[in-house]
Amino acid sequence: MNASISRRSAVNKVSPMRITATCVLIISLSILPFDPLAAAEWGNLSGRIVYTGTIPKVELLEITRDEEVCGQHQLVDESLVVNPKDRGLQNVVVWLSSKKTVPVHPSFAENTKPAKLDNHNCRFVPRIVTLRTGQMLLSTNSDPVAHNVAVYGRRNTPFSEVIPNDSPLKKTFSREELVPIRVDCSIHAWMRAYLMITEHPYAAVTDKHGRFSISNVPAGTWQFKFWHEKVGCLPVISNGDKEVELSRGGWDIDISGPDVILDQLSVSQLEDE
């Protein structure tokens, strides 16, 4: 019996060196820096906005410059574009608006891909560009006539420059803009575009079906703003049968799950800003 007890004692015995190593490991893990990004949760916000008002009649623009080139493209007024089949409202800008720093998902850490704005067939393509501070904007000219880019910055310095024929015009912006800012071609008065400049990647523009999607938003309640060039910040939006009054276009939305879907949004009226 004594031999058996002796053997069990030998098996259960832990050396002082092993105890010391275990303590060192626990202490080392306890002093590692806390990573808020690793601990944060993220969600995707998506939705669809339809226009329930009278769909505007498509009107041709009056071309008063470079008619031999621009006049052949049947250019129309694109300030209010509604899909006649599903009433999707195009070119609504949706973005997260916050006075405090917004955590950015690690997948957006690299911000090296430039945003692009082309002058094509005497119109800006796309009509609205979203980009982040420090991200390069490449403005190009695909037409055989001269174009320039006039950016009416509010928090960034305004500029108006001709686009070189052989290379894009390169610009970056150091400050976010609180609302989309206007872009014109000073040579062709009908040309119009907008830039939405944010410090984070959480901005989107509705497509031809009125759909938008913003991925990997930090969990929590955030204010999202809704803007359209005909009225500026939307004063009201309908969510199904409920009418939501927006404060300067802002709506507090809770990102509390992997997918927050707002697929019953509608706007009944848009008046000129």
Image (cartoon, helix red, strand yellow):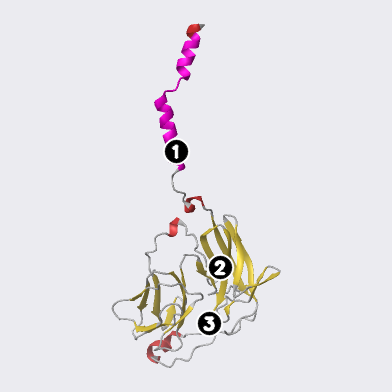
Q: Amino acid at mark 2?
A: Arg
Label 1: element kind: helix
Q: Give me the disc on residue 27.
A: 1
Q: Position of residue 131 (x, y in %)?
A: 44, 70
- Counting other residues with Cα less than 10 Å from the Cα at mark 1, is it few (<14), some (14-19), or many (20 or more)? few
Specify whether 234 is left or right of 124: right
Residue type of the residue flagged with mark 1:
Ile
In the image, farthest residue toward the right: 241
- Which quarter of the picture shows residue 139? bottom left
Q: Is residue 26 magenta?
A: yes
Between tags 1 and 3, which lies in front? 1
Q: Residue at x 47, y 65 (%)?
A: 201
Q: For the C terminus, which image quadrant?
A: bottom right
Q: Are marks 1 and 2 in contact (CB under 8 Å)?
A: no
Residue where numbered disc 3 is placed? 79
Taking the spot 43% from the left edge, 93% from the top edge, the residue there is 64
Q: Which residue is mark 2?
A: 211
Closest to the observer, 184 or 235:
235
Q: Is residue 86 visible?
A: no
User: Which sits earlier in the primary sequence, circle 1 or circle 3?
Assistant: 1
Percent coordinates x, y for residue 33 in the rendering: 44, 48
- Could you give the CA–CA distance between mark 1 and mark 3, rounded to whole angstroms? 62 Å
Q: Nearer the viewer, mark 1 or mark 2?
A: 1
What range is drawn magenta here? 4-30
